[in-house]
Amino acid sequence: MVRKFLYLSVLLSVFWIGFSNVAVAAGDEEDKTGFIMHHVKDSHEWHFATFGHTHITLPLPVIIYSSDRGLEIYSSSNFQNPETHLFGKEYGHNGYYIDEHDHLKAVDDRSFLDLSITKNVAMLFIVLAVVLWILLAAASHYKKNPGTAPKGAASFIEPIVVFVRDEIALPNIGHHKYKNFTPYLLTIFFFIWFGNLLGLFPGAANLTGNIAVTATLAIFTFFVTNLNGNKDYWKHVVATPGVPLPLLLIIVPVEIIGLFTKPFALMVRLFVAITAGHIVILSFIGLIFVFESYAVGFASTIMVVFINMIELLVATIQAYVFTLFSAMYIGQAVAQHDHH
């Protein structure tokens, strides 16, 4: 297993360094590390590489809805300099422009709804497609071959499904309810896991390192937890049994705040872990182009391989941790208490 991780880490490291080389070699000498934030942030275009003055990009749809003009759809290439591929107010189109921070704005500051397919949204669709393809392939095998040993995608998926069911859902939720929530736990585990792994490829979007995505996942867990909370759960929140009345004035607000700090912790933990990993990898690669030294290049390459090995583990660990804590919160909400 360690050997496989090493091989994959070396392969990813070669891709990272090669990708970063073409991305910054022709860039501004004063901003050779600018590609770091460009990779981490969301964008209205998907930039892959730069060769000389040639930019390899994928323009993405800019979708706008306003009450006076209705639905409008443009290509992001209409909003950028065709030579430098930079956005700015001077490259506006039909009353809209994308500023230097990649935010869509109206020239006259009127209100509108931005429904654009950004890089992270496109990556979201890719992750969903990969997850659906693998899971449906596994389900199709069991449907066509009931009672037989798993093969192909099924042999890859089954151990993970069994692990999430027996090691996460069952111990934390309990025998009486774990089957109800196992599908949800499997969904968030596979989505986060594949999103983390695919995000390690050079040029990929930083999907699970986007706080809007992690916040949405945390909100899902928040609603699943609290909408399924039983009377004992809510009684412990609003009127903790066995606590003197004066102390309730302190404990009840703390319990209510705790309802929101739990999903907040889920959101921040995943966002920070994934984003930090990408920044560290890209920072070591950036050192190669800042110092332009063979010694620094060799040392940075060794560090990138090492960090890539860690990131492959982190991708799995963060999916496990998010799923585990979601199961714990749900388990606390549906637990059956026996009061005497």
Image (tube, rainbow, N blue to C red):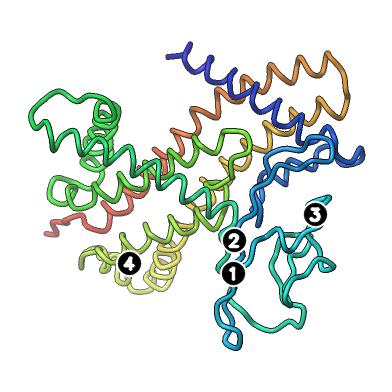
Q: Residues within 10 Å of mark 3 (few under 14, many from 20)?
A: few
Query: Mark 1 = which residue?
Result: 73
Amino acid on which the number 1 mark rests in the picture: Ile
Q: Residue at x 74, y 63 (%)?
A: 79
Q: Is residue 213 shown above or below 246? A: above
Residue placed furthest toward the right:
30
Query: Mark 2 = which residue?
Result: 61
Instruction: Find numbered disc 1 in the image and state the secondary structure of the residue it sits on.
Output: strand
Which one is in front, 327 or 199?
199
Which one is in front, 168 or 298?
298
Amino acid on which the number 4 mark rests in the picture: Val
The answer to whether the residue labelled 2 contacts the one labelled 1, judged by CB atoms less than 8 Å apart, is yes
Q: Is residue 117 left or right of residue 327?
A: right
Mark 4 or mark 3, which has the lower sequence index?
Answer: 3
Give the Cα distance between marks 2 and 1: 7 Å
Amino acid on which the number 2 mark rests in the picture: Pro
Q: Quadrant of residue 223?
A: bottom left
Q: Is residue 59 left or right of residue 311?
A: right
Which one is in front, 265 or 273?
273
Query: Mark 4 = which residue?
Result: 237
Amino acid on which the number 3 mark rests in the picture: Pro
Q: Residue at x 87, y 41 (%)?
A: 31
The image's mark for residue 34 is: none
Q: Residue at x 30, y 47 (%)?
A: 185
Q: Residues within 10 Å of mark 2 (few under 14, many from 20)?
A: some
Mark 3 or mark 1, which has the lower sequence index?
Answer: 1
Query: Mark 3 = which residue?
Result: 82
Mark 3 or mark 2, which has the lower sequence index?
Answer: 2
Q: Is residue 28 shown above or below 331? A: above
Residue 271 in the image: state x and y as whole percent: 55, 48
Give the Cα distance between marks 3 and 2: 16 Å
